[in-house]
Image (cartoon, rainbow, N blue to C red):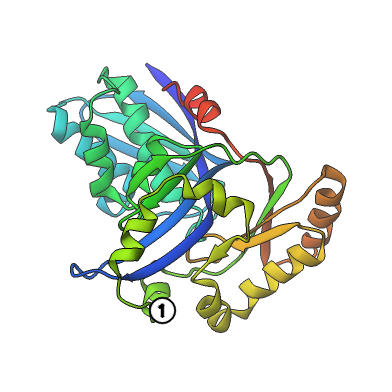
């Protein structure tokens, strides 16, 4: 059996860091959105080994790669003796706050389950996803969703549709660990914890100003990222925000003509990669992945 699936990127439409937890991680509230920028993963049942090949940007091989880790975790959980050949066509910028690695891991779980005949409705998938990374559980759902805790507790929210957006990615790699280290977030309070558990808050937030608590410190350390946001707004974006801990920034436009003019201007920035994108709803996401 041979199967090819898209592996969509995400943006954070909103991100609050509420404080450090006793376990050393940070408590956050975020609103995530899948977008049309995507990698592509092809799966083929083969022998007893997991073989991963890829083109485009270089990625770590072996157990350092989330796709390989996802494959081995799935085999271990369901006692599968079969292997697979996996080919990754990479388009999502690495280390840009767009969740490419996490998306690849989630789609590997989905694709290999189909190839190996594992029931996708089994709750074990969420458990496996949670061990692979904070954003991986989100990519089992897609669309618009809130994330609480470390970001791994996902609840689907109402769609946040947009058709004309740009993601621009300066060629920088900003680690999440360094971004968190730059914050001086206050300790959590009970009020904050109760407040973030209300998923209906997402609709209220998205009607107002978009926010990312990492912007201030990241822009101070990497002015190029702040300049990317300023440029998107100057070129006509109605709203713009850094995604995750950077370095990618997105802008939402109200029409295709303005977006195309902006893309042309951004193309003159030789150290940036820019992509025309749209929101991918949860329904569309599930259809594309055969869920």
Q: Residue at left 18%, top 70%?
A: 22
Looking at the figure, which quarter contains the N terminus? Answer: top left
Residue in front for this viewpoint, 259 or 31: 31
> Residue 18 lies in what quarter of the image?
bottom left
Q: Residue at left 35%, top 64%?
A: 192
Which residue is the extreme one toward the left? 79
> Residue 23 lies in what quarter of the image?
bottom left
| Left or right: residue 43 compared with residue 133 | right
Res. 165 in view:
yes
| Left or right: residue 256 compared with residue 185 | right
Q: Position of residue 76 (x, y in %)?
A: 14, 35
Q: Residue at left 35%, top 51%?
A: 197
Q: Secondary structure at mark 1?
A: loop
What is the tally of numbered marks visible in this picture? Answer: 1
Residue in front for this viewpoint, 112 or 215: 215
Looking at the figure, which quarter contains the C terminus? Answer: top left
Res. 27 in view:
no
Q: Position of residue 226 (x, y in %)?
A: 64, 74
Does residue 113 sit above or below 189 in this rendering? above
């Amino acid at each position: 059996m041979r199967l090819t699936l898209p592996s969509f990127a995400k943006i954070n439409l909103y991100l609050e860091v509420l404080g450090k937890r006793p376990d050393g991680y940070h408590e956050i509230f975020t609103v995530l959105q899948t977008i049309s920028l995507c990698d592509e993963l092809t799966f083929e049942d083969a022998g007893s080994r997991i073989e991963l090949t890829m083109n485009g940007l270089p990625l770590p091989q072996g157990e350092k790669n989330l796709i390989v880790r996802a494959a081995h975790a799935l085999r271990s959980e369901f006692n599968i003796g079969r292997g697979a050949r996996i080919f990754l066509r990479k388009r999502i910028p690495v280390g840009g706050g767009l969740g490419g690695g996490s998306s690849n891991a989630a789609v590997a779980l989905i694709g290999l389950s189909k190839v190996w005949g594992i029931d996708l409705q089994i709750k074990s998938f969420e458990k496996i996803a949670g061990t692979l990374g904070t954003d991986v559980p989100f990519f089992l759902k897609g669309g618009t969703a809130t994330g609480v805790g470390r970001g791994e507790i996902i609840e689907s929210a109402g769609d946040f549709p947009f058709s004309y957006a740009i993601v621009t990615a300066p060629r920088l790699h900003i680690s999440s660990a360094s971004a968190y280290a730059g914050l001086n977030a206050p300790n959590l309070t009970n009020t904050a914890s109760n407040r973030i558990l209300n998923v209906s808050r997402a609709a209220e937030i998205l009607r107002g100003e978009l926010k990312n608590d990492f912007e201030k410190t990241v822009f101070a350390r990497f002015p190029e990222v702040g300049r990317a946001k300023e440029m998107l707004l100057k070129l006509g974006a109605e709203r713009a925000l850094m995604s995750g801990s950077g370095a990618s920034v997105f802008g939402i436009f109200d029409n295709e003509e303005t977006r195309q003019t902006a893309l042309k201007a951004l193309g003159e920035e030789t150290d940036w990669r820019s992509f025309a994108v749209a929101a991918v709803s949860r329904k569309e996401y599930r259809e594309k992945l055969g869920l």
